Image: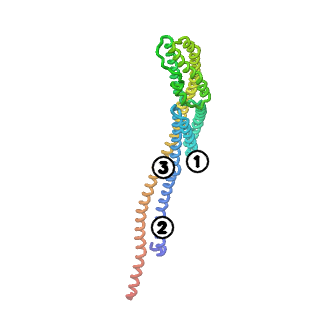
Amino acid sequence: MKNIRLGVKLIGGFILVAVIVAVVGVFGLTGAQQMNRHVEEIGTVRLPSIEALLEAELAAEEMLVAQRTLLSELLSQEQRDTYLQNYRNARQELLDTWEYFTTLPATAEEERLSASFENELDEWFQLNDQWLRMNAEFERIGILDPGALVADIQQFRGDHYSVELEVSMLLLSNQVFEGNDDATACNFGRWLAGFSTQNAELQRLLNQTRPPHNTFHQAAGQIRDLHRAGNRAAAQTLFENTMLPASEEVFEYFYEIIALANEADRQRDNITTLVLGDVSDEAYEAMAVLDDLIHINEDIAAAAVAQAAADGAQVVFIAIVGIIVGVILALALGVILTRGITGPVAKGVAYAQKLSEGD
């Protein structure tokens, strides 16, 4: 230090302090960049990935809910249209969300699982397309509650058997029969007045049932009146030649209506088997892959959070160490420079003083 000029000492001291500040700043900047990368990984990749996968899973669940709701026999056609539209909306939402997910950066494992999901999705959608065709065919039949229709027709058949039996007992044993000739007053007549269907075949059968049904009730009323008038022979002839043939014709149409309803019921059973079987199984297999993708992104996000915390702790540690070391070095450097500068200056002052004293 004795042989170094004063200017060099000062410049060297400032340079050393600048180096210390630069080193601390570089470590801090590096740590901040690492933390920024982790935050970017979490905010721009992992969280959007998890959100997209959860939305895709929710859309898949909504598709299943709509399909299972459409199995209900209690829905009107308007309600069925609403749930079918809900299904289509959810299906499109699933496709859109998955397409967005595929645009995000992915790991090799995610790429593998994504390919697996697309295979599962393709198989699932093929089954869904089959379900859509079967559902359309079921709705074209136009008998949305075939079980209820069969139950009603069976009841109406029993009602008319009862009337036929009462008329028979009237003729055989003079039992009281209070029936009338109003075909619209029986259970079937009242039901027929308020029933509507889009099924042309069912409507045809119901229309063809009306004439023999009217004849059946008119004959029952006429037989009652003839029997009361004492004309039993005419009543018996009317029963055998008019009422019984009309009854058989009505029952024949009832059997055809039941067969038509049973066809619709078989179609509904096939749909139920498909929805609760293959469609559900394939849907849950696809959603299981989505769950795996969600777990991967959660794990990566958790690791990024942990690494960001570690990097943050490292930056804090380096900053503290840098501050301590920098303060110590700066103080030491200050002492050294002060001594290196003030010592020679003091000697010069002493020398000048001695000269002034005449030495």
- Which is nearer the eye, 171 or 332? 171
Q: Helix, strand, or loop for circle 2?
A: helix
Q: Which mark is residue 103?
A: 1
Picture quarter with the C terminus:
bottom left
Q: Amino acid at mark 1?
A: Thr
How far apart in space, not on screen, are marks 3 and 1 (Cα)? 21 Å
The percent position of residue 34, horizontal first and vertical second, equals 50, 55
Mark with earlier residue (3, 1)? 1
Horizontal relation, residue 91 to residue 341: left or right:
right
Q: Label 3: which residue?
A: 304
- Which is nearer the eye, 270 or 236? 236
Q: Amino acid at mark 2?
A: Ala
Q: Is residue 6 above or below residue 270?
A: below
| Residue 123 visible, this angle | no
Q: Residues within 10 Å of mark 2 (few under 14, many from 20)?
A: few
Mark with earlier residue (1, 2)? 2
The percent position of residue 216, horizontal first and vertical second, equals 56, 20
Query: Residue placed at 45% from the left, 72% from the top?
Result: 1
Q: Residues within 10 Å of mark 1 (few under 14, many from 20)?
A: few
Q: Residues within 10 Å of mark 3 (few under 14, many from 20)?
A: many
Horizontal relation, residue 318 to residue 214: left or right:
left
Mark with earlier residue (2, 3)? 2
Q: Helix, strand, or loop for circle 3?
A: helix
Q: Amino acid at mark 3?
A: Ala
- Which residue, as the protein is rendered here, is positioned at the far left? 357
Q: Which mark is residue 18?
A: 2
Query: Residue placed at 55% from the left, 37% from the top?
Result: 78
